[in-house]
Amino acid sequence: MIVFSDLDGTFFDSHKRIPALNAKAMDELAARSIEFVPCSGRPLAGIVPEVLEHPSVHYAISANGAAVTDVRTGMTLHRIDLGLERALAIYQLACNHDVTFDFFADGHDYMCREQYDRLAEFVDDPYVLASMRTTRTPFDGDPVDFAYTLKHIERIAIYWRDPADRDTLEAQISQDESVAIVRSYDTNIEVSDVRASKGSALTWLCDHLGIPVAEAVAFGDNINDISMIEAAGTGVAVANAEPEVRAAADVIAHSNDEAGVGRFVLEQLGATL
């Protein structure tokens, strides 16, 4: 058994906390030498130490599968970048709309300071907003010039206010068949190389570790989780998941606010709740 879990909306509750039963499940996995792999749209630096430093965690999948990292050594074991050229092409499209633009690069998330200061205009949920401010690093100066300073651009994210902006950008970006568009919040789109997904990263890591994919259990709630829900031997959607995620899952667990991940894992291990 190996456990892969999305964080926001899945492993974390709605206040971005780790429920007690989820923490207990991680402890139980560590005691049995079973890997817990955070599998997040967040950059590596945005995955909280409480998760990364837990003894059950040796690997992390970040940026929607663009990077697989050995968290003990800090070494990136596998990466599929969006890259500078495609990121800047999308940026030029985004400049024509009232949207934000994030460079997920080198394990971090960068946003120009002017947009960083406007985040509250694009995000209503105070807990999501606080998390976004914590995980983003604002930069000054021209975004194109800044992009040239980045080594590995893993993916980009765009938050919008007007659905017309979303629709136009999705239509324009999707003309490039080398990229894939998903989302993790109602008001964003996330663009990666078409080969980079949580599902492909799950498959790669299982192969790297010599663990059959059939033994993998994966948890998720949003559109960017569907690929790993489908790739895992057991795909689990938390009850608060999007309808498309629930439809793709083998099992529906309790919601993130009811510690659905922890409850399911502990039950599978035969441990007490």
Image: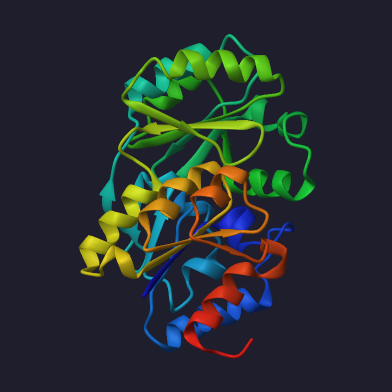
Residue 100, above or below 70? above
| Residue 83, horizontal then vertical, whole percent | 33, 29
Q: Which residue is at the front of the view, 143 or 37?
A: 37
Using the rendered image of the protein, determine whether residue 259 is visible from the camera's viewpoint: yes
Residue 174, above or below 137? above
Left-right relation of 24 to 60: right
Residue for point 59% across, 63% down: 11
| Residue 23, horizontal then vertical, whole percent | 59, 77
Residue for point 51% across, 40% down: 109
Position of the N terminus, as image quadrant, is bottom left
Q: Which residue is at the front of the view, 236 or 123?
A: 236
Position of the C terminus, as image quadrant, is bottom right
Residue 52, above or below 239? below
In terms of image quadrants, where is residue 60? Answer: bottom left
Q: How is the image coloured?
A: rainbow
Left-right relation of 249 to 263: left
Left-right relation of 57 to 85: right
| Residue 19, horizontal then vertical, whole percent | 68, 72
Left-right relation of 75 to 255: left
In terms of image quadrants, where is residue 136? Answer: top right
Number of labels in the image equals: 0
| Residue 81, horizontal then vertical, whole percent | 32, 36
In terms of image quadrants, where is residue 34? Answer: bottom left
- Report the residue that reaches farthest toward the top: 96
Residue for point 41% across, 26% down: 147
Using the rendered image of the protein, determine whether residue 76 is visible from the camera's viewpoint: no
Q: Which residue is at the front of the view, 120 or 23?
A: 23
